Amino acid sequence: MSSRVPLTYGKKVLELFRNPKNLGRIEDANAEAIAGSLACGDMIAIYLKIDESTEKIVDAKFESYGCAANIAAASILTEMVKGKTLQDSWKISWKDVSNELGGLPSVKYHCGVLAVGSLRRAIRAYYTNRAKPDWLSDELTQEEKHALEEEKLMEVLAKKAKRAML
Amino acid sequence: MTYSDLSRPIDELIKSHGLPEREVYLDHENSGLIFPEVLEIMDNTYRLSGKGHPSITHLMGWISYQALYEATTNIASAINCSPEEIVYTHSGTEANNLAIMGSSGLSSNRKKVLVSRIEHLSVIFPAEKLEKYGFKVIKIPVDEEGFVNLDFLSEHVDKETLIVSVAAINHEIGTIQDIKAIRDIVRDKDEGVLIHTDACDALGRIPLDMKKLDVDLASFSSHKVYGPKGVGALYVKEGVKLEPIIHGQLSTQKLWPGVENVPGIVGFSKAVEIMHRNFRENVLKMTDLRERLISSILNNIEHTLLNGPFGDKRAPDNVNISFLYCEGEALTVELSMKGIYVSSGSACTSRVLEPSHVLLAIGRKHEEAHGSLLMKVSPFHTTSDIEYVLEILPDTVRRIRSLSPIKPLRKVI
């Protein structure tokens, strides 16, 4: 049996929840993506402004529908990628996000995963009509798969709930 | 308890949160505040009459037994039953478990358990546990306000049914069920079916007379009437035979071994007495505060839905509203920083992927359930407390909505 204890967010999570950095959209973003869904109660959108010659992220913003950890994870990730090349940003894992937040509670790891999942989707989106670099794997990474699984699972659960009502 | 789940010292978090200047506690669903008179009488009982074990033959035992007996008589008189019909447990959860699990060994022919879809998990989980022992559990559907489908009940209850369990008032959405109608349907089908009602949320909110209600089993919880935590009770109608589900040294309670929490029971009894004495006044006050909250929120905050019925069929203390385009845990934490303590039916709050089973059962979509807030007003609250909540809430909702990629008036995916 699992137990339930209050979630001990680090103070960084509360700080970013109170005053999120990089909140909003970038109107002339050249890459953007969304992961999660309203039905999951967990959704992150990432907007990137990328310098095409250097492939560096010059601006990053987010929007988030979810808990405090979700908002903080998306916010910190946009901080982390600013100024980085797409290749370096691709390497950021959900653990890096969690560490940067002072360690997410275990039940909130998926918030870090979803944030990284949406970033990687955005990077993939950037290369849809451009030459794909070697470092960009064809196969989906764990974080992207997780986002996909969560979205699919919720579809199934929502259908199940609908059936149960009939 | 798993302290290891605390990934860091909690004092850092509490410090970072800060102590709000003003506080309004509306999370009575999870933990009730306590009447000062109750604390006082418990303190006295710990020091004086509740020192001994109420089943032991010496002066301390006798005095303790006397305290227990008086407390029980008091509760029995409030709900119109005999003191013999009250079994103490240490929570409403335990009382519900005793009702469901304790009845399971009674008959080899009755292998059907009927519970409503919106029961408390302390009813649903024991019922589901019985499935492992060959019982068939049927969950009675409810309508969009949470009222059980009486036709469905009538179709499914039969001589093979062991027990039917429906809460008198739903703990999340405040639906006041017609327990007498449910009882009549069940008895009409078969006199031998046990009828249990989880009355934890009903005590002190609607008149409860065990003789008139005429059910077999009813659960109560002390903290829900602003008594101490750690005390619950099950009404077991005279003649109804349950089997104990925990075993140990015999005590005054045939069905719940272990030393009675005499000071806690005395406190519970005091709380019942206060709620009973001021019944009308409390109900009117809570209803007024509830209506202020509901009407103001629905009128002033866009994209809100009331969960559960409007008006007289709703518990006087219950406010449950979905704030669309908002995630409930974020709302809960934001309100906490403003000193307003509430709970949410979001998946994040329950720590599973699924949001509140009650909200899904009344037909709420996942995203509607994720944005729900449960607030319970109490006799402790003043109009000014509620005004404070109403002053803070619109900005809170606006801010949480401003964070989201999916906003009102935009196409929703």
Image (tube, coloured by chain):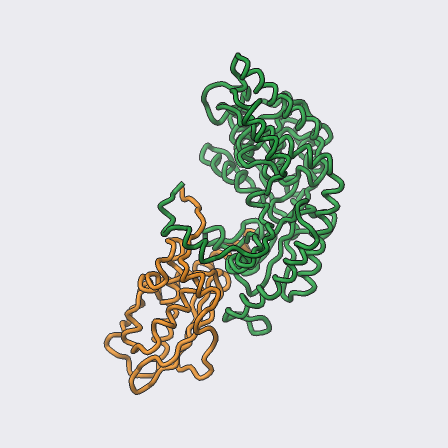
Chain colours: A orange, B green
Q: Position of residue B267 (x, y in %)?
A: 60, 31
Question: Is residue A125 visible in this depiction of the protein?
Answer: yes
Q: Residue furthest left?
A: A134
Quadrant in the rendering for residue B31:
top right
**A74 relative position to B358: left or right:** left
Q: Position of residue B394 (x, y in %)?
A: 62, 65
Q: Position of residue B33 (x, y in %)?
A: 59, 43
Question: Is residue B155 visible in this depiction of the protein?
Answer: no
The residue at the point 54 percent across, 38 percent down is: B123
Q: Residue furthest top?
A: B57
Q: Quadrant of the N terminus of chain B?
A: top left
Q: Classify B78 as above or below B397.
A: above
Q: Classify A104 as above or below B235.
A: below
* Near-viewer residue (A51 or B289): B289
* Near-viewer residue (A140 or A160): A140
Q: Classify B310 as above or below B43.
A: below
Q: Residue furthest bottom?
A: A53
Q: Position of residue B233 (x, y in %)?
A: 59, 30
The residue at the point 54 percent across, 61 percent down is: B367
